[in-house]
Image: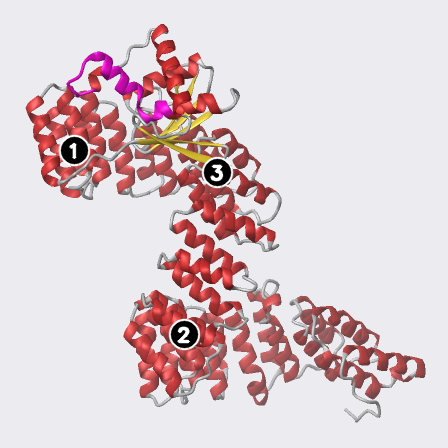
Amino acid sequence: MPASPWPTPRSVRQASQLHAILTTSGRIDHPPSAGHLLNSLTNCLSAPRHLCYALSLFDRLPQHTTFLFDTALRACLRASAGADHPVQLFIRMRRGGVRTDAFTFHFLFRCCALPRARAGASAGLCRMLHAACLRTMFPSAAPLVANPLIHMYAALGLPDDARRAFDEIPVKDAVVWTTVIGGLSKTGMLDEARKLLEQAPERNVVSWTSLIAGYSRAGRAAEAVACFSSMLSDGVAPDEVTVIGVLSACAQLKDLDLGRSLHFLVGEKRIKMSDNLVVALIDMYAKCGDIACAQGVFDAVGRGQKPQPWNAIIDGYCKLGHVDVARSLFDQMDAPDVITFNSMITGYIHSGRLRDALLLFMQMRRHNLHSDNFTVVSLLTACASLGALPQGRALHASVEQRLVEEDVYLVTALVDMYMKCGRVDEATIVFQRTGERDVHTWSAMMTGLAFNGMGKVALEYFCQMKRDGFQPNSVTYIAVLTACSHSCLLNEGRLHFNEMRSLHRIRPRIEHYGCMIDLLARSGLLDEAMDLVQTMPMQPNAVIWGSILSACRVHKKIDLARYAAENLLKLEPDEDAVYVQLYNIYIDSRQWVDASRIRLLMEEQGVKKTAGYSSITVAGQVHKFVVNDQSHPWTIEIIAMMDEIAQRLKSAGYSPITSKITLDVDEEEKEQALLAHSEKMAISFGLISLAPNLPIHIMKNLRVCEDCHSAIKLISKLWNREIIVRDRSRFHHFRDGTCSCNDFW
C-alpha cells in the first residue's frame, strides 16, 4: 500500500481527530489515506469498546481490499473480540469476491482461540475455516498459518484435530513442534505429547516445560520429575516456568529434598524470582511441612504489595492448622483479596471455629468482596454439622441478596443445612423454589427426610425424581434405603434394594448393604440380616456390626450380641460405645456376672465412657449441659422448671423407666438421676428462655435414652411445644405427644 502523507496517530483519540480531518477535507474516500487511518486505529486498540468504532470506520470505506479486511480482522484480535465479528468479516470477503491470503487465516485462527471467542467457536466452525484455508492456500503459506491453526484447536480442547493439522503440515519448524506438544499437554494427551517430544528435531525449554506442567496438572507428579531429569540430561537449561511446574510436582509428592535443591538451583542459575515463583516455593515448603522455610522465603522476597505471596503463606499456615498465625499475617495485609478471605475462612472451618469463619465472612461483605460459592458451600456444610441454624439462615440471606451466585451446589448445601438443623419445612421451600436441580439435590432432600423420620415422604420424592427424568445413582439409593431403614419400611426396602441391582445395574456398595442389614435387624429379622452379612461380597464394617449389636439389645439376642461385639471390637478396640452396649444388654438380661466382666474389661483396657451432653442455642449463644449440671448462670430457674416438669409428668401418669439405672440406689434417687439427664436440662432451659411459639431445638452427642424419649413426648403435649432433638443417629420431632421416629430408633 502506498505511503500516506498523513501523520500516524498514537492513540484512539488522535485517530478520531485524523478521521475528522479526512472527512472534512474529502480525503476519506482516498484509499491510501483511508487505509492508513484504519491501520493506525487498529494499532491503537486496547479495549473491546473501541472495536465498534474500528468496524464502523471499515464499513464506511469506499472499497474493501484484502489488506483492509485483514486489518479489520487484526482489530478483532487486538480487541479480544468474540467469534462473531471475525467470522462475519470472512463471510463478507467470500461473498464480495475478495481474495483471502495467509494473513486472513492467520488472524481468523488466532481470533477463534481467544478466551471470549471460545464459547462461540464450535468445532464445526473451526474445521470449516481449516478446510477453507486448505482450498485457497498454497504450501508456502503454511509457516504463517500452521502455528495459529494448531493453537486454535488446542485452545478449544480439540487435541485430535490439532494432531491431524500438525500431520498435514509439509514443513514443520520448531515453533509448530512446540505448539502441538504444548497443546496436547494442556488437553491431557500427555503420552501422545511425550512421544512427539521424543521425535522432535529440536527440544527446547518451552516444549519440555509444557509437558512438565501437564504432568503436574494431571497429578502425575513422579512423571513430571522424571521429565525434568530428562530435560537436564538433554542439556536444556530450565527457566522460571519450568521450576514452577517441578515445584508443583514436589508439593504433590511432598519431596522436600528435591524442593530444596530446586530452590538452590534458582539462586545458582540466577533465575528471576517472580511472584509466581515465590508463590510456588512457599506452597512447596508449606505442603512439605517445612513452614519455617516457607516463612523464610516470604520474609526474604514475598512481603511486597502484591497479594499472591501473602495468600500462599496464609494458606500454608491454615492447611497446617496454624490459623492464629495465619490470622496475624492476614491482619498485617493492606488489602486482602477474595482468595485471602477464602483461605482464612476455610482454615477456620477445618479447625472447627465456625464462629470466626462466619465473622470473617461478614467482614468480607463489608469490604465489598464477593465470596466464591465454594466458600459459602463450606460454611453451610459447617453449619449443618454443628446444627448452627441462625448462622445458616444468615448465609441463606446472603444468597437471597445475590451476594453470591446461586447454583445447584449452593442449593444442595442449603437443603442439607436446613435438613441437618431439623427444619424440614425450610429445606422444602428451598428445594421447591430452585429451578436447577441435579441428582445430588434430590438425594440431599431424600436423605434429610429420612433422618428426620419422614421415610414415606422421601420415597414419594424418589418417585417424583424418576418422573422428572432423573436417573438414580448409587448415592440416591443410599438415601432411599436409609429412608426405609429409619422408618421401618421393610417391603419397600427389599423392593428398592432388588430394583437397584436388576433395573439400574448398580452394584451395591457397603453403604447399601449396611442400610439393608440395619432395616432387617431393626425389624427383628436377625437371621436374615446375618445371612446378608455372610453373603455380601465385602467384609462387614463397624457400622454393620453396630446395627446388629443394637438390634440384639432390642430383641434380646444375647449370643448374637456377644458375637457381634467380638467382631466390632476387632475393628474398633477402643470404642467405648461397644462395651457400653454389651454391658447394657447383659444388664437387661440380668446376667450380672457378664456385665461385671465387661466393666472390668473396660477398666483394664483404659476405655472410658464418653460423657453425654446436650446443647441448645438461644439468642445466638450455645448453652451446653451435662448430666446433673449446676454450672449454668440460670441453674436455680432450670431446677425449678425441672421440678415443675417432674410434677406435671407424674400428674399425667408418667412413670420413669428406672430399670435402666444400674446403680444400687433406691427408686427415688433413680428417678432424680433420670430427671437430671442433659437433654431434660436443656429442654428446661428452652422452656424458660424461648418464646412459647418457638420450637426447642436440642443437640445430643449420644443417642437419646428410652426414658428421655418417653418423657419428651409427653412434655411436647403438656406444654404444647415442638421439640426437636438431634442425637447421634437421627432427628426426633416431638409434637403433641408423638415422635417422628414412631418409637423406632
> Which residue matches tag 3?
415
Instruction: Give the mark, 3 or 2, whose residue is nearer the N terminus.
Output: 2
Instruction: Give the mark, 2 or 1, whose residue is nearer the N terminus.
Output: 2
Instruction: Give the CA distance from mark 3 to mark 2.
Output: 44 Å
Quadrant that contains the N terminus: bottom right
Q: What kind of element bears circle 2? A: helix
Which numbered mark, 3 or 1, is in the foreground of this view? 1
Give above or below for 675 relative to 384: above
Front residue of 670 and 87: 670
Is 679 colored magenta in this rendering?
yes
Q: What kind of element bears circle 1? A: helix
Could you tell me if the residues under marks 3 and 2 are in contact, i.e. CB atoms within 8 Å? no
Give above or below for 368 relative to 540: below
Could you tell me if the residues under marks 3 and 1 are in contact, i.e. CB atoms within 8 Å? no
> Which residue matches tag 1?
579
Which residue is outermost to the right?
A: 25
> Where is residue 694 drawn, in percent x and y?
51, 24
Which residue is outermost to the left?
A: 593
> Which residue matches tag 2?
297
Instruction: Give the CA distance from mark 3 to mark 1.
Output: 36 Å
Question: In the shown orientation, is residue 547 left or right of residue 210?
Answer: left
Residue 557 placement: quadrant:
top left
Q: Dot 3: few (<14), some (14–19), or many (≥20) neighbours within 10 Å?
A: many
Question: In the shown orientation, is residue 218 left or right of residue 465?
Answer: left
Give above or below for 182 relative to 415: below
